[in-house]
Image (tube, rainbow, N blue to C red):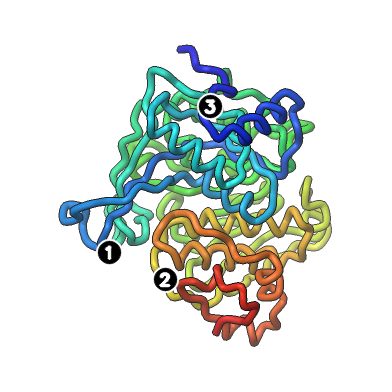
């Protein structure tokens, strides 16, 4: 199968020109994100999909969500993927480029379509059965352009061009060639960038497969994000400490615990050498509570948390503040209906992250808080 070259990706002219220059010179960016994005159809009103009369179009994809959020937060990012040579592919590339992301490494496939999916506004289930009230998500992605991602189609100079390479477990579930690519990218070898990995367990995608494959991928990475509920559903691990016992290899492990907050496991040396974390020094286990949030929709919060933590890591902020920035960007996503939210102004987010423990514990964030430029502390 022959793919059109990355330079053929449709994007605004300025973005194409900038992307071509980066590709030719292998310019370094802060973060490279690799994975499938799809056109998302979001219901016009609450309720089961069978009762929704109309939908509005958005974009969805864990990795591109992280790339867009980081770009809007002031970082240079690149998205590596494949889309179909169709209108949905055009829309995805244009929308992601418009967020400030370099799309020069996106390939167009004339034979495979761009994936699409429909969803309700509730939270995604972490098991196939899922409790009542969780989201309905219907994917039309089998045989998509991105499912053909493989070690032969992805150039090392594209994925190693960042200080960080961000991946998720979704890619490994798409096809055998995607699993081979993920195995290569998570293989520890000299010269690679910091590899960040969000487990992002999707039960429907792993149906009939061994979810411990996700743990094997995680073990090859430097920074890993996983939800406590995901770890329970996929691996039968009861809590954050059990997750760390099962995944001792990552220099930084963040276990997200929903509205309660998150726990990070790392070491003094890993915090000090943020760009190339290594074990050493005193072990650290730090739990950081999340602020109270008036939730509009749960979808996209995990991607936003990863973006917030990565942004603060790139800036060399203290470990507690990295966690708080993750919570703040997650709160920005939780208070909008779409997958992707505009992050708060950096100065305002920094001020909130620096609150003392009492003030942080009183913090309550509702719809519109991230767009408020008044500088006050929400409460």
Pointer 2 or 3: first along the chain: 3
* Vertical placement of residue 181 versus 135, above or below: above
Q: Residue furthest front?
A: 13
Measure the alpha-carbon separation of dots 3 and 1. Answer: 39 Å
Residue beneath disc 2 = 295
> Which residue is pictured at 70% across the width and 34% down the height?
188
* Vertical placement of residue 359 versus 316, above or below: below
Q: Position of residue 85 (x, y in %)?
A: 42, 24
Q: Quadrant of the N terminus?
A: top left
* Residue 343 visible within the image: yes
Residue beneath disc 1 = 133
Name the foreground residue: 303 vs 126.
303
> Which residue is pictured at 78% across the width and 45% down the height?
276
Pointer 1 or 2: first along the chain: 1
Which of discs 3 and 1 lies nearer the camera? The answer is 3
Check disc 1: other Cα within 10 Å, few if <14, some if 14-19, many if 20+: some
SS type, badge 1: loop
In the rendered structure, the answer to whether residue 236 lies left or right of residue 122 reads right
């Amino acid at each position: 199968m022959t793919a059109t070259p990355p330079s053929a990706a449709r994007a605004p002219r300025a973005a194409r020109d900038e992307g071509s220059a980066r590709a030719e010179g292998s310019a370094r960016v802060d973060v490279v994100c690799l994975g499938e994005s799809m056109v998302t159809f979001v219901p016009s009103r609450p309720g089961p999909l069978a009762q929704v009369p109309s939908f509005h179009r958005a974009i969805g994809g864990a990795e591109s969500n992280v790339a867009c959020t980081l770009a809007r937060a002031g970082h240079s990012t690149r998205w590596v993927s494949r889309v179909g040579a169709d209108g949905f592919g055009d829309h995805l590339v244009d929308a992601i480029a418009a967020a400030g992301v370099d799309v020069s490494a996106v390939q167009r496939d004339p034979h495979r379509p761009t994936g699409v999916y429909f969803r309700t506004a509730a939270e995604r289930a972490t098991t196939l059965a899922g409790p009542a009230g969780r989201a309905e998500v219907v994917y039309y992605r089998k045989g998509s352009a991105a499912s053909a991602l493989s070690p032969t189609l992805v150039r090392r100079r594209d994925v190693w061009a960042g200080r960080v390479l961000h991946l998720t477990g979704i890619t490994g579930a798409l096809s055998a060639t995607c699993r081979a690519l993920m195995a290569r990218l998570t293989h520890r070898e000299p010269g690679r960038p910091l590899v960040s990995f969000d487990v992002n367990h999707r039960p429907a995608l792993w149906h009939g497969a061994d979810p411990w494959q996700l743990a094997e991928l995680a073990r090859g990475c430097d920074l890993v994000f996983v939800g406590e509920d995901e770890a329970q559903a996929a691996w039968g691990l009861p809590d954050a400490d059990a997750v760390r016992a099962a995944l001792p290899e990552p220099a930084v492990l963040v276990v997200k615990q929903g509205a309660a907050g998150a726990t990070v496991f790392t070491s003094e040396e890993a915090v000090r050498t943020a760009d190339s974390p290594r074990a050493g020094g005193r072990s650290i286990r730090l739990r950081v509570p999340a602020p109270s949030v008036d939730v509009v929709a749960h979808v996209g919060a995990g991607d936003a948390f990863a973006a917030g933590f990565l942004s603060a890591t790139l800036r060399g902020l203290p470990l507690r503040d990295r966690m708080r920035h993750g919570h703040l960007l997650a709160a920005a996503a939780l208070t909008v209906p779409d997958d992707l939210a505009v992050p708060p102004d950096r100065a305002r987010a920094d001020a909130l992250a620096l609150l003392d423990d009492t003030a942080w514990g009183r913090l309550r964030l509702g719809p519109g808080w991230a767009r408020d430029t008044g500088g006050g502390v929400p409460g």
